[in-house]
Every structure is written in C-alpha cells, then in structure tokens.
Amino acid sequence: MKATFTLPAIVLLTITFFSACTKQDYISSPSDEEVWVRSHEKGSVAYVDTYAGNYIVETYNGYSVVQSSGGIVPRENDTEYAWFSSQGNQTIYNYDGNYYTQERIVQSYLTWSDALIILDNISH
C-alpha cells in the first residue's frame, strides 16, 4: 500500500519540478524590423530614376534625394525607414520588400522641384 502512494507522489513531484524549470515568454519580443520601424523616419518612394537607380523619398519634412549604391532599387510607393533628415551614408529598411540597403542621403528638406533638380544633377 505504501508503494502505491509513494510512486505516484514521486512522479508528481518530478513532473512539477521539470515543468517549473521551463520558461515560456507569452509576450513575444519585437523583431529587428519592428524596432527599426519605430525608431526611424518613415518615407514613401515618390520617384525612381530607373537608369541610375537614384530616387526621391517623400517624408514628413519634405523630400529627400537618395543616391543608390548599385544594390536593390526600390519601387515607387514603397515604404522605407531611415534617418532621411540626416545626410550621408546609412542603412535604409524597405518595409514592402523586407530588405535593408546601404544608400547615401544626398539632401533633405526639399521641395518637389528642388528634389528633381538634385536628382537630375547626381544621375547624369
């Protein structure tokens, strides 16, 4: 009779011990893309020079001209995230294509006509 109660008690304690040692996160941690989207400026690709690969991005602060490094060229209306108000080389995340590229922000805070002039100057 004693062995009948001892064996189930040992099994129950073993199950309790091992189930207490596992940990499950019920709130998933954000992915790199989610963090990137929340911490960078949002822009929409307004125009792409398909010959040179350079393009114009419309942001909250106006237009920014991006010089391609020869990698993947975005499509018009793609959503991108980067520091578009800061000039220089940086990483840009294309939300629609789910990829990162290294590009150069040539100039920011532009009107549409100024952005087209600068794009024309760097493309030819």
Image: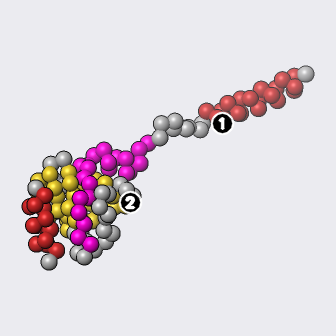
Region of the chain picked out in magenta, as a range? 29-50
4, 112: nearer the viewer: 112
How far across and down, in percent of the image, does residue 100 sit?
Answer: 34, 61
43 on left or right of 8: left
Q: Amino acid at mark 2?
A: Gly
Tell me the residue that label 1 is attached to: 18
48, 41: nearer the viewer: 48
Image color mode: secondary structure
Name the N-terminal-most of marks 2 and 1.
Answer: 1
**Of tags 2 and 1, which is closer to the observer?**
2
CA distance separating discs 2 and 1: 43 Å
95 on left or right of 28: left
Asked if the stretch drawn in magenta spans residue 115, the answer is no
Tell me the residue that label 2 is attached to: 97
Tell me the element at label 1.
Answer: helix
How far across and down, in percent of the image, does residue 106 sit?
Answer: 14, 64
Q: Name above or below for residue 24 compared with residue 86.
A: above
Which residue is farthest front? 113
Asked if the stretch drawn in magenta spans residue 33, the answer is yes
Query: Who's the residue at 31% across and 71% down the image?
Result: 71
Q: Amino acid at mark 1?
A: Phe
65 on left or right of 94: left
Question: The N terminus lies in which quarter of the figure?
Answer: top right
How far across and down, in percent of the image, does residue 89 sit?
Answer: 20, 64
Question: The C terminus lies in which quarter of the figure?
Answer: bottom left
